Every structure is written in C-alpha cells, then in structure tokens.
C-alpha cells in the first residue's frame, strides 16, 4: 500500500491524482492532503479520503481548518504554513508525494520530499526551473525516485529505456516537446492586443488552473518545460525542439541515434501520467477513454510562432545564460501573469516585463537554496517596480 501526499489537492492535478487513487483503494491511500487557502474544499476531500494529516499553506487559516475537521468528526490532524508543507512532504506519513503546488511556492516542499527519499511525482515545473541542480542533488542524496507528471515530460520518461532520465545513456539525440499552441494559435500580435484573462484561460484541450492556462497561451509554459527537460534528461538547449501539435494526442517524442523516433500518445487527460507515475513500473487503469486514432484523423505538427509568442525564446535565452537566469525568468513571469489576471497588465506586455526584468538582473552561479530564494524575491520586486514605471 503506497501512502500518497497530494500537495495542491484542491487544484486540477490534485483532483486527477485523487481520482486515480480512489480507483485503486487496495494499492494507494491519500495519507496527506494540502491546499493553499481553500479550507472548505480541503475539508470536503478529508471527509472523503480520511487522511492522517491536512495542511493549509496560509498559516492564518489553521484554526479554521482544525475547527472544521473537528466539526466533521474527523481524526485528521491539521497543520498550517510553508514549513508545515515541507515537514509533511518529508514525514513518515507518506512514501510518495504529488508535488502539484503552482509556482515558486512549491519549491521548498518539493526539495524536502526529494531529500527524504520519497517517490516524487513532479508537476511543479517551477521547482526544476528555479533549482534544477539542487533538486537533482536532493534526489541523489535522498535515494528517492523522481517521475515527472507533466504530460510532456512523462511522455519522454516513457519513451526512454530504464529509469528514463538520461538522454545520452539511452542513445537518444533530441527531444521533441509538443505544444497545443494554446487558445491563440494562428493569431498575430495585433489580434492579441486586447486579449482578456477569460479568453487566455479558455484552453482548447486541457482543463488547468488560471496561471498555467495563461502560461500555455503565451507559450511560457512550453519555455519552462524546455528548461525542465534540460535538467531532467540531460539535454542541451539544441537537443530540445518545440513543435506545435494542436490535437494534443502526441504528448512528446524522442529521436534516437539510429533515426528511430518514439512517441507517447493518449487522450489529453492528466490521469494517464499520474497513474503511470503512481504505479511505475507497473501499469494500472486510469479511467481515461481509449484513444480512437480513426476518429482523431490526421495528426498535424507545425513550428511555433516565436515572433508572436516571445516567451518561448526568453526561456531558451535564460537556459543558455544559466545560473540564476531561469529563477529570474520564472519570478518575473509569475508577477506578470498575476498582473494580467488582475487586469493591470496587457497580454502582450507579459513578455515585455519578463524581458526587462532579465535585462536588469545579472545572472550569477547558483549558491544554494537561500541564494535562489533571495534572487526570486529580488526579481519579483524588480518586476513590480518596472511595471509601475512603464518597464523603464
């Protein structure tokens, strides 16, 4: 019986993970559930799954969580705050951790799970973008397992032999990361000038949270995945190619030295990757509809429109610069996306603000977690200042 901590339990990935867990009660138990601020939703999940521990990231909500758990007649313990998230991820209450907290907020708990030797089901791509070397060191030192559950990186993992985390050892020469193209595929910059948050969040294929939906619309999500693929699979920037595949049925491909190309296909449903990672190396039923290739028709691929969706090139640039540049990129993007969702920044200005922030902060060698957190905070403040002063 695997005891699973679901960090980000009230989000879309958390819901998919819990659906798979519920389908296999003889194999998995949701022993820890964590959320950011949604106390009522977290308590409702606790009523259903009866975890040992529930954690709310906002420390001010601890009393509310504890009282509502007691009112529901549950013996589930309550904890709150970012330190409690990390303690839960590293605790003996779980042996597997679904790291699905959005953004830099998920970094410390992800590292804690890695250091504690857990099976880490990684959806928090920002942890790899910010702290790729630190995360890989933590996995190695802790003796645990890292299985990506982004659909693209999980596809690559499945296409590579063995543990699926080394491009060179597998005799592979490049990765083809597929992108849906988001809701604005085919539009030019003039057509994007007045885009609203609701339009940006209306993804044509995937059901996702608002932040990641905006990242998909700008192609920053794919840029972050390029950086993630570099660290997870030892691929150079030149070995990672992004191709737009609007049907979202081919989740990524790997080309090998002999010219063979392996692809992982499936309907766009996160439960496939989650079921694979939870049960790996076995295969289990995930509740996903069978893929009907005849009904799907022709599978199309095209190059991304880099001049229109500039965030992708900014991510490649940060990866090539290295050091703390990806941390600055990620922080500036989180500030820009939040401002766009609040209505205070135009859609096209997201890339402009990120570029201005990258230009303002020189990249440095990564000196540890505290250094990265300092750079992250500095980049956020810089982006906020530049936004107030017209990026000057």
Image (tube, rainbow, N blue to C red):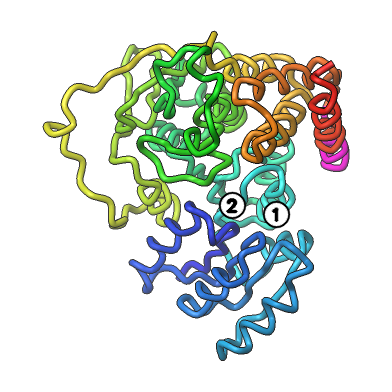
Which class describes the residues within 10 Å of circle 1: few (<14), some (14-19), or many (20+)?
many
Q: Residue at x 45, y 59 (%)?
A: 15
Quadrant of the rendered image containing residue 267: top left
Quadrant of the rendered image containing residue 93: bottom right
Q: Are marks 1 and 2 in contact (CB under 8 Å)?
A: yes
As rendered, which of 209 and 196 lies closer to the eye? 196
Residue 53, labelled with which disc? Answer: none
Location of residue 126 with respect to 186 vertically, above or below? below
Location of residue 328 with respect to 290 vertically, above or below? above
Q: Residue at x 56, y 19 (%)?
A: 193
Which class describes the residues within 10 Å of circle 2: few (<14), some (14-19), or many (20+)?
many
| SS at badge 1 | helix
Q: Residue at x 65, y 36 (%)?
A: 343
For the stretch drawn in magenta, what is the main secondary structure? helix
Location of residue 222 with respect to 3 vertically, above or below? above
Q: Which callout, 1 or 2, points at the residue further toward the start of the chain?
A: 2
Whether residue 66 is visible: yes
Name the residue beneath numbered marker 2.
99
Horizontal and vertical percent for residue 231? Answer: 62, 29
- The residue sitting at the front extreme is 194
| SS at badge 2 | strand
Location of residue 130 with respect to 260 vertically, above or below? below
Residue 109, labelled with which disc? Answer: 1
Quadrant of the rendered image containing residue 17: bottom left
Residue 304 inside the magenta-drawn segment: no
Image quadrant where one finds the C terminus: top right
Horizontal and vertical percent for residue 222? Answer: 52, 26
Horizontal and vertical percent for residue 362? Answer: 86, 18
- The residue sitting at the top extreme is 307
Residue segment shown in magenta: 366-374
Horizontal and vertical percent for residue 206? Answer: 39, 41
């Amino acid at each position: 019986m695997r005891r699973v901590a679901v960090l980000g339990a009230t989000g879309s990935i958390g819901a998919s993970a819990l659906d798979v867990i519920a389908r296999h009660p003889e194999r998995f138990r949701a022993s820890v559930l964590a959320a950011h601020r949604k106390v009522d939703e977290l308590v409702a999940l606790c009523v259903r799954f009866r975890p040992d521990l529930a954690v709310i990231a906002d420390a001010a909500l601890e009393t509310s969580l504890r009282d509502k758990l007691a009112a529901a007649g549950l013996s589930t313990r309550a904890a709150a705050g970012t330190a409690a998230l990390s303690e839960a991820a590293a605790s003996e209450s779980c042996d597997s951790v679904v790291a699905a907290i959005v953004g830099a907020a998920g970094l410390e708990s992800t590292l804690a799970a890695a250091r504690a030797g857990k099976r880490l089901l990684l959806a928090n791509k920002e942890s790899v973008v910010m702290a790729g070397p630190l995360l890989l060191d933590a996995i190695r030192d802790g003796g645990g397992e890292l299985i990506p559950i982004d659909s693209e990186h999980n596809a690559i993992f499945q296409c590579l032999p063995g543990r699926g985390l080394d491009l060179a050892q597998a005799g592979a020469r490049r990765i083809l990361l597929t992108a849906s193209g988001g809701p604005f595929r085919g539009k030019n910059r003039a057509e994007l000038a007045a885009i609203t948050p609701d339009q940006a969040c209306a993804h044509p294929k995937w059901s996702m949270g608002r932040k990641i939906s905006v990242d998909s619309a700008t192609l920053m999500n794919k840029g972050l995945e390029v950086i993630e693929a570099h660290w997870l699979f030892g691929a150079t920037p030149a070995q990672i190619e992004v191709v737009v595949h609007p049907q979202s049925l081919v989740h990524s491909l790997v080309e090998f030295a002999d010219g063979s190309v392996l692809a992982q296909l499936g309907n766009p449903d996160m439960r496939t990757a989650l079921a694979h990672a939870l049960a790996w190396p076995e295969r289990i039923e995930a509740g996903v509809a069978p893929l009907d290739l005849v009904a799907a028709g022709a599978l199309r691929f095209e190059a991304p429109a880099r001049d229109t969706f500039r965030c992708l090139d900014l991510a490649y640039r940060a990866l090539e610069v290295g050091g703390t540049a990806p941390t600055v990129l990620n922080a500036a993007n989180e500030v820009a996306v939040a401002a766009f969702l609040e209505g205070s920044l135009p859609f096209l200005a997201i890339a402009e603000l990120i570029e201005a922030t990258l230009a303002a902060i020189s990249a440095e060698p990564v000196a540890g977690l505290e250094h990265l957190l300092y750079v992250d905070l500095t980049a956020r403040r810089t982006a906020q200042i530049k936004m107030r002063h017209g990026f000057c």
